[in-house]
Amino acid sequence: MKLATIGIGNAGTKILDRMLEFEYNTDRNLCRHALAINTARTDLAKPDFVPEDRRVLIGDTHQKAKGHGVGGDVEIGADVAKTDIEEIRRAFDDVEIHDVDAILVSAGLGGGTGSGAGPVVIDELQKMYDEPVYGLGVLPGKYEGGRPALNAARSLQSFVTNVDNFIAFDNDAWRMRDQTIEEGYEDMNRELATRIVTLLAAGEQDNTEVAENAMDSSDIMRTLDTGGVSSIGYASSKVDEEAGLIGKFRGDGQDFDDGATDAAKIKGLVRRAVNSRLTIPCEVSSADRALIVLSGPPETFARKGLESARQWLEQEADTVEVLAGDDPRDNAAELSAVVLLSNVTETPRIKELQSQAVDAQEKIKAQDAVREQEIEDLITDEDNELDPVI
Amino acid sequence: MKFALVGVGGAGCRLVDRIMQVEQNSDRSFSGGNVLAYDTDKSIFETLDAVPLDRHVLVGDTHEALGSTGADGDIDQAAAVAQEDRDELHREFDKLDLHEMDAVFVAAGFGGGTGGGVGPVIVEALTAVSELPIYVLGVLPTTAEDATITVNAARSLQSFVTHGDNTLLFDNESWYDEERSLAEQYEELNELLAHRLLAVFAAGERQSADIAENRLDTSDVMRIMETGGVSTLGYAEIAVHNPTTLFQRLRALFYNGEEETTDAIRITQLVKAAANSELTLPCDRTSTERALVVLSGPPHLCSRKGFEKARQWLEQETETVVVLAGDEPRPTADDLRVAVLFSNVTTVPRIEELKESALTAIRDQS
């Protein structure tokens, strides 16, 4: 697939940056256009792979932002994007939309910019183009607190309504130990980038090395066509060079067992991908459609293996709409299986997030309601015998 | 973040002077020299070291009502004079370069005639001429001071909180050492407050600073402060071993192999220590509406898990859902510092006490 990609806010920009990094390191060419949009000038200085002229600061003239972020306020995030919509639109002038199959917008949903400006940008993209617009959104962890949960629960509604499909990443499930603040979410973002790029880059080399069973962009798009929230599973194993070589020698059919072993290996890899930590944990059987991409050196592929993995997933996901295909990568060091579970409807974390958000909203409302009175009570005496100076 | 800094009255001017000195001795930028010092008593200006001469503003020198030593504790007189001279006070604002600023801090002792009387007029004037948030940095008197001072403080508190966008308080009563005279301690108390103030409001403003991962943007700080009301600061620091040369690092690795596992715990404990430290204005922490926590130190010692856990703890502790957290990397520092801002605290025993004493004093007079 070929994509135009947009990272919005700090988290969205970092994910985009890691996607570009992964793509660069693995000789993929998925993101034909990359654009970073943020409200904080300092954060826009951070990316390593997003070119400087593809970074857009919005809200620098907005009274409440001034280029210093939106303070985690989704309303201001949305307002800033609406005000600067012309500037955002202009940034798309150089995008050759005919060159791409779809647009991907990445954002963190817990902050103010990604969650607020994200849906505004997506809405605009939907108006401008016929190509599908996908969302890649990070849900804040429970530990991040009530306010981010509220931002995310509200923003999730806008995202899912406005995008053609929303691929979710749950910070809670992926929280890693022993990291410094400086390292931040780097490792998590790398994991996410590996999954999303491996999945969507399949079928980008439409004309080069067309394997019989090659995954096609239209297959991926068809699977994503369901709308709703999707989750990705991933597993990989190192390609043992020696074994690969032997495998090639045996390719002449001398060893009948070998096909079966490779097939078993591939089926095992796919099962591992589904049973691994998904980008958002979910009930696999609640998926509407599913898709398997097997990516690696073509000599490691076994068609029988992929077909039996596909059948297995059909049962597991309880759907007849399971597509499977190869993504041949000659020089890949790993054989990886990536599984897309499209429109999963049972995701415990989203339910939990929503109830956390409801609690937070009630608390904030309660505080708002008594604020003026409490301040008044603090500074004045009951009988108003004390007068202010002015 | 860029703040204009305005001192009013003896205590306010001295505090501004001290903040400027602390700022100049650090590599942080807070006011960048955008200061003004207002007083009715000329002699105060002679005690200022950092505030330049052209930023001294004498209020009411043409008014007979004010003697040569200024307002002498009469806040109504001082406020009246300031109201009359409003235009002149305004004109001085031009020196502040307000267009370039993010907010203004007006520092004043609430008990003084000038601080408590002229202060609110200046705060009101600033809110009238500028769209910037106007914050108050106020000092509450000790209980040992005159009844007039107590009444002044209780009354000016109302005006400051009503007209300012947020009022950050320091309580002399809680902090001064009764064994010594208060005048002796001004310097150290001001210094202490200045350090805390810069730890929160000048975080990440170091020259040639590394970009923080969770940098606190001006908008974040504004958001915490936008509640209005009264706020207070907590602070804690701890010395750490931060080997900066390769040799030191190798040696540290050899001797302290197990140290890293405790990084997370150390950060959590330090945040707790800051939140539970003696606040600039002691209060019931659960009455806080919003909070902000800033962690500053060598980045490799700032455990994310520890900081996340600490933020979560603070959210539970303060019973609020708006707790923002930010970090400030200082690669070569040999300490970790945490500052906590509790915004809009509404259960404050010291303020209740102040109001009571003021009422008693008023009743005694009549």
Image: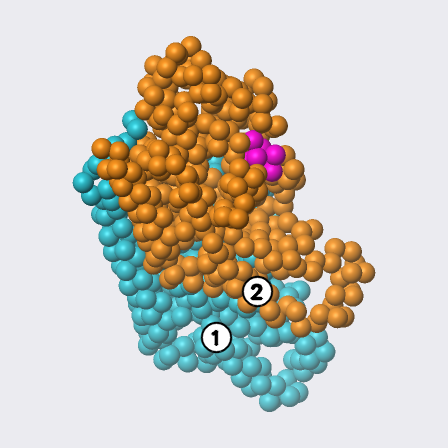
Chain colours: A cyan, B orange
Q: Dot 2: few (<14), some (14–19), or many (≥20) neighbours within 10 Å?
A: some
Q: In the rendered image, is residue A60 in sight?
A: no
Image quadrant in which you'd find residue B249: bottom right
Q: Quadrant of the C terminus of chain B?
A: top left
Q: Does residue A192 lie above or below B180 as drawn?
A: below
Q: Which residues lie in the magenta part?
A: B17-23
> Image quadrant of residue A258?
bottom right
| Label annotation for residue A276 | 1
> The residue marked by circle 2 belongs to what chain?
B
Q: How crowded is mark 1: few (under 14 residues within 10 Å), some or many (20 or more)?
A: some
Nearest the viewer among A198 and B245 is: B245
Nearest the camera: A158 or A293?
Answer: A158
Up/down of A329 relative to A246, above or below: above
Q: Position of residue B299 (x, y in %)?
A: 62, 55
- Subunit bearing disc 1: A
- Label 2 element class: helix
Rendered location of residue A367, percent (x, y)? 27, 50
Q: Is residue B287 magenta?
A: no
Q: What residue type is labelled 1?
A: Ser
Q: From this view, report whether residue A340 is shown above or below residue A368.
A: below
Residue shown at 65%/37% (left/top)? B25
Tell me residue B125's x, y (percent): 36, 23
From the viewer's perspective, tell me whether residue A184 is left or right of residue B316: right
- For image coordinates 35% across by 74% down, the residue present is A283
Please tell me whether mark 2 or mark 1 is closer to you in this view.
Answer: 2
Q: Distance between the residues labelled 2 and 1?
A: 33 Å
Q: Which residue is drawn at 28% across and 63% down?
A: A355
**Mark on residue B266?**
2
Residue B241, percent from left and from top: 69, 60
